Image (tube, rainbow, N blue to C red):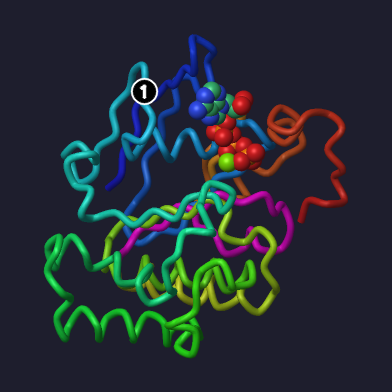
Amino acid sequence: MLRVQDLSVNYQGVPALTGVSFTVNPGSLVGILGPNGAGKSTLVKAMLGLVRSTQGLVDYHNQPLQRQLNQIAYVPQRSQIDWDYPVTVAQVVMMARTVPTGWGRSPGRQARLLVREALLRVGMENYSDRQIGELSGGQQQRMFLARSLATQASLLFFDEPFSGIDRQTEEIMFDIFTELKAAGKTILVISHDLGESLKNYDYLLMLNKELIAAGTKQEIFNKANLHKCYGRNLNMSMVC
Ligand SMILES: Nc1ncnc2c1ncn2[C@@H]1O[C@H](COP(=O)(O)OP(=O)(O)OP(=O)(O)O)[C@@H](O)[C@H]1O
Ligand SMILES: [Mg+2]
């Protein structure tokens, strides 16, 4: 089980997140929702120790998550990646195996096989030797999904994996999430979509500097929570 307790983050003394607590069962797909600036990326980064929290605990299987980074795959928001870095698709996916293989050692046959299988699973097997800057937005997301699969992590974080991708890529991603769930893995996904895609999630977190609501869509999708999270100007016709 993943347990976040009373997590808070300040940036230069300004609160970005206050007192966030929730638990997630293994084998679930969790959606993290909230408007721009709500602290969604901050929540994930604080859980992973990429930004410092001012207070709070994050446990996975009753041990601090930050001591189990080998269990984790994380795909940051796309804007935070240097796309000019001269590296190919296969090299990015192979990074997933760098830690298990050991720095400086060449990947073995099994690592290469895992990378090939992962690229095949996301339909990117013909792009192995492409520079990452020469990929479309959807192809970039698929590449990172392949890298996450190749890590064989049990806890996966995706920050806005659906931004700027087509319906087919979104469907492939949700299919893969379903397979990962069936294998007992836990997936947390930050999304801005309040439409049909919400049916895919087992559990939702509605965030705006604090946790506004947590639960199934049926439990938390009501006007009061939505207005509290997104403001009164939210166009309810956009909400599924
Ligand atoms: N490194 C930083 N230094 C200072 N302030 C930051 C930093 N990173 C984020 N913030 C601020 O913290 C708040 C939350 O940012 P965060 O990126 O977590 O939001 P978000 O919910 O992921 O938004 P978006 O949907 O736009 O990605 C914002 O007001 C942002 O400006
Ligand atoms: Mg963000």
In front of the other: 113 or 207? 113
Is residue 210 something that shows in the picture? no
What amino acid is found at the position of numbered circle 1 in the picture? Ser
Q: Nearer the viewer, residue 174 or 226?
A: 174
Residue 190 is inside the magenta segment: yes
Say which residue label 1 marks.
Answer: 53
Answer with the quadrant where ligand 2 appears in the image: top right
Expressed as whole percent of the image width and height from the top left, the position of residue 177 reads: 45, 69
The quadrant where residue 118 appears: bottom left
Query: Cβ of disc 1 within 8 Å of ligand 1?
Result: no
Q: Residue at x 54, y 41 (%)?
A: 205
Q: Is residue 88 above or below residue 120?
A: above
State the residue at coordinates (48%, 55%): 158
Q: Is residue 70 left or right of residue 135?
A: left
Count of numbered circles in the view = 1
Vertical side of 36 occupied by 28: above or below: below
Where disc 1 sits, the SS reads loop
Image x and y of residue 54, in percent: 36, 16
Task: Please tell me which residue is depicted at 30% across the width and 65% down the height of the picture.
Answer: 95
Q: Nearer the viewer, residue 32 or 106?
A: 106
Q: Position of residue 45 (x, y in %)?
A: 41, 38
Q: Residues within 10 Å of mark 1 (few under 14, many from 20)?
A: many
Instruction: Let me know if residue 49 appears in the view.
Output: yes
- On whether residue 34 falls in the magenta region, the answer is no
Q: Which residues are magenta?
A: 184-202
Which quadrant is the C terminus positioned in? bottom right
Q: Position of residue 206 (x, y in %)?
A: 59, 38
The image quarter in which residue 185 lies: bottom left
